[in-house]
Amino acid sequence: MTFGGWIPDEVRDFSLLKRNSGALTSVSICAFTIERDGSLTDTISPVHAEFMKWANANGIIVWATIGGTRRSLPWAIQGRARERLVKELAAACAKYGLGGIDVDIEGIAGKVRDDYTLFIAKLVSALQAMTPPRQVAATVMDFPSAEDEAGGPFDYLVLGLLADEVRVMLYDYSCDAPGPIMPREYFAEELAFARSKIPKEKFVAALPWYGRDWCGGDTEDLTRLEDADPPPGVVPEWREPEGELSLSFTRDGKRHEVWLPDPRKFAWMVDEVRKAGASGIYVWHLGCASPEYFKLVRGKVRR
C-alpha cells in the first residue's frame, strides 16, 4: 500500500520525515486557501519550499491541499469562480512542481453536490492536460450508509470514477462531546461502505494520528500525549470496545477528558484497511509522527 499524510501549515520541522523518507509515498501541504472569487492564496514559507524541493528529489509526490472558509464556499466552486480556480490550481502545480491537487473542501451542504462534482471533473481534465499530467485527490467525509451519503455533498461512486484518489476521512467520530476519535464498530461500518462504492485502486483510507482534549465546552486537538499535560501519575488507559487510549484528570479546577490514538490503535486500523483492499493510507497529520508510528508504517503499510 501507499502511505502519506497531511502537513499542517504550522509544521516547520521536517527532520523526522526526512529520516523516514523511504516510508513516504506522498505528502500533502496544507498551505493553500481558495477565495470566494476563485483566486488562490498560499502561505508557502522558505522552509516549506525547501522541504517540497527535497521531497521531489527523493521521489515523494508533493500535493497541495486546498480548502476554503464560509466566506468562500460554495461560491469558489461555482460558475466563473470555478473556472478561475481551476486555472490557478494548474498554475500552482507548474510553479511549485506539484504532483497533484488534494481537494479537501469541508463544511459544504448536500445541495452543492453537483457543483462539487463538476469542479472535480473540470480540475481532473485541466491537470491531465498538463505536461506531465498531474493528479487529483478528493478528500471526503465518512458515511456509514448509502442513505447518509446520498444526502451529502460527496458522490462516492462518481468521485471514484473521476479522481485519481478518494481519501475518506475515517476519524472525528467524537467532536462536541468527549469520546473516541474513531471507535472500532463505526470504523468497520464506514470502511465497508466506502469500499463498496470506491474502486480499491483509488480508495485511500485516512486515519488519525491526533488526539483531542475536552475541557468543559472547549476542545483542543493534541499532537501527542504530553500536550495534554496530565498531572504526575495519571496515565492513559486502553479502552475497549473503542480500541483507543483515554484518560481523565482535573487541572486548575477544570475537568479534562482526553482520547488519543497511538501506535497500537494505528496497527489495528491498518490491519482492517488492508483486509478491505484499500490502495493506500493517509494520516492526519504528519506533525504527530513518531519513530514508533514510522516503524509500523514500514512493517505493516509499506511491506
Image (cartoon, rainbow, N blue to C red):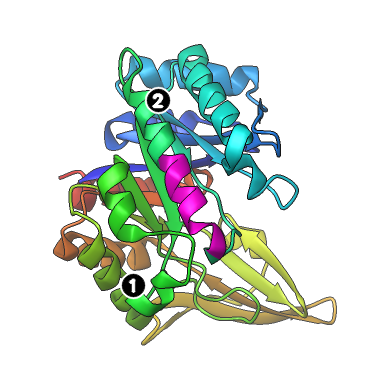
Answer above or below: position of 90 versus 256: above
* Contact flag, marks 2 and 1 (Cβ < 8 Å): no
Q: Position of residue 5 (x, y in %)?
A: 42, 43
Q: Position of residue 110 (x, y in %)?
A: 53, 65
Residue occupying the point 64% across, 36% down: 34
Residue topped by disc 2:
126
Q: Position of residue 191 (x, y in %)?
A: 29, 69
Residue type at tag 1: Glu
Residue type at tag 2: Ala
Q: Is residue 115 magenta?
A: yes
Q: Which residues are magenta?
A: 111-120
For the stretch drawn in magenta, the main secondary structure is: helix
Front label number (2 vs 1): 2
Q: Who is closer to the viewer here, 31 or 75?
A: 75
Within 10 Å of disc 1 (Cα), the crowding (few <14, some 14-19, many 20+) is some
Answer above or below: position of 63 versus 161: above
Residue topped by disc 1:
190
Q: Is residue 19 magenta?
A: no
In what element is the residue under mark 1? Answer: helix
Answer above or below: position of 41 versus 244: above
Residue occupying the point 50% across, 74% down: 173
